[in-house]
Image (cartoon, grey):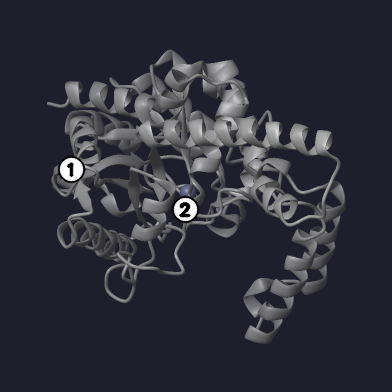
Amino acid sequence: MSRHYLLPLALILAACGSPEPEEQAQTREQSQTQEQAATTDTAALHDRLLTLDTHIDIPLTYMTEIDPYGDTDLQVDLPKLQQGQLDSGFWIVYTPQGEMTDAGFAQGREIAQTRINAITRLTRENPSFGLATTAADVRRIVGEGRHAVLVGMENAFPLGAETALPELQAYADMGVRYVGITHFGHNQFGDSSNPHPERDVAAGADPRHGGLSKLGEELVRRLNDAGIMVDVSHAGKATMMQAAELSRTPIIASHSGVKAVADTARNLDDEQLRKIAEVGGVAQMVALGSYVKLPTAEQQAARDALDAEFGDRASWDQAKRDRYGERRAAITAMAPEANVSDFADHIDHAVKIAGIDHVGIASDFDGGGGIDGWRDASETQNVTAELVRRGYSEEQIAKIWGGNLLRVMEAVEAEAR
Ligand SMILES: [Zn+2]
């Protein structure tokens, strides 16, 4: 937690402290007044912004067992969206990578449909939400004081093999406006940034396609035709670079960090950032702790030792899983977790390399995201405050918080046929 977030507490403590010399008290009052004015300015600025988060996950029980119109254990629900003034976002139709068989595809389609149904219900049963399928929809719905809900698909796996591709239009009709080519593990469309240890690596199928497969190339063309953004988060570098070349429209990385700050397989290197800028796209920086900040050498060594001690996961019973979880949490606690300042380092670097017009924000809430200071949607102002503190202008912050993404969306809408 940075000093900035401690300030309100510091103010409270100062207010109930013992008497102090008059001069000191005056100086303190002055700096408090300045700080309060800055806080008020930032709050007003945050209020004026259209904020758009490109990655909000949902559990499979969303809208059936979980009611997101009230308080929930989720990081995103209506009260938290209101408190944090998070105006809009992509709610995610995530499908884990399964076996590339007819049975696997059928299971993938069922999972995808469950989540699409939930998001549709979310936007139909409470006027605080509205389904947005165009950039203009987002601006209109947010202008009405409501939350604009867009649909993004994470992992194209449920689209199946050739026969299912023509059905892409059906997903477009259900509101899907971006499709991520892969998740963890290579699939029928392309190689992932993270090959599956057994299915890909141990099976001698890494790389599987060397980027996009023929079917993957067809997917990119069909996404362009359907007016759906091509998302390269989770895609391997070759897949991503080929998609950028092939797509008639700008591509997006819906939730990725930068390797220059945290060198993980999932994050983008400078060449990728430049390519995204070159094609007019946008890289949305993700607030997921392990992609924002690397473990210390000490933590990594402790994790490796723990993994070696516990052995093959497949053989663990529940008690052993619990013991592992406790030990793993203790290792995590060995160093401060990623915070909003660490997150802003990714934004700064992406802006430096790709330019202010090609960077945005994604929380990955309810999918592993959340950092100290932006733990859930209710704390969204803290991200704006950090950008203000780093000297970004209101115009620049508006671009980062959604303007850039909406520009890409409009470009993609214009190319649909
Ligand atoms: Zn993801």
User: Is the CB of the residue bearing disc 1 within 8 angstroms of ligand 1?
Assistant: no
Q: Position of residue 131 (x, y in %)?
A: 19, 47
Identify the amino acid type marked 2.
Ser
Identify the amino acid type marked 1.
Ala
In this rendering, does residue 124 appear at all? yes
Q: From the viewer's perspective, is residue 111 above or below residue 40?
A: below
Q: CA distance from mark 1 to mark 2?
A: 30 Å
**Does residue 142 appear left or right of residue 97 in this picture?**
left
In this rendering, does residue 163 appear at all? no
Dot 1: element: helix
- Where residue 375 sits, quadrant-wise, is bottom right
Q: From the viewer's perspective, is residue 181 above or below residue 97?
A: above
Q: Position of residue 402 (x, y in %)?
A: 37, 31
**At 76% from the left edge and 49% from the top edge, which residue is drawn?**
295
What residue is pinned by disc 2? Answer: 378
What residue is pinned by disc 1? Answer: 172
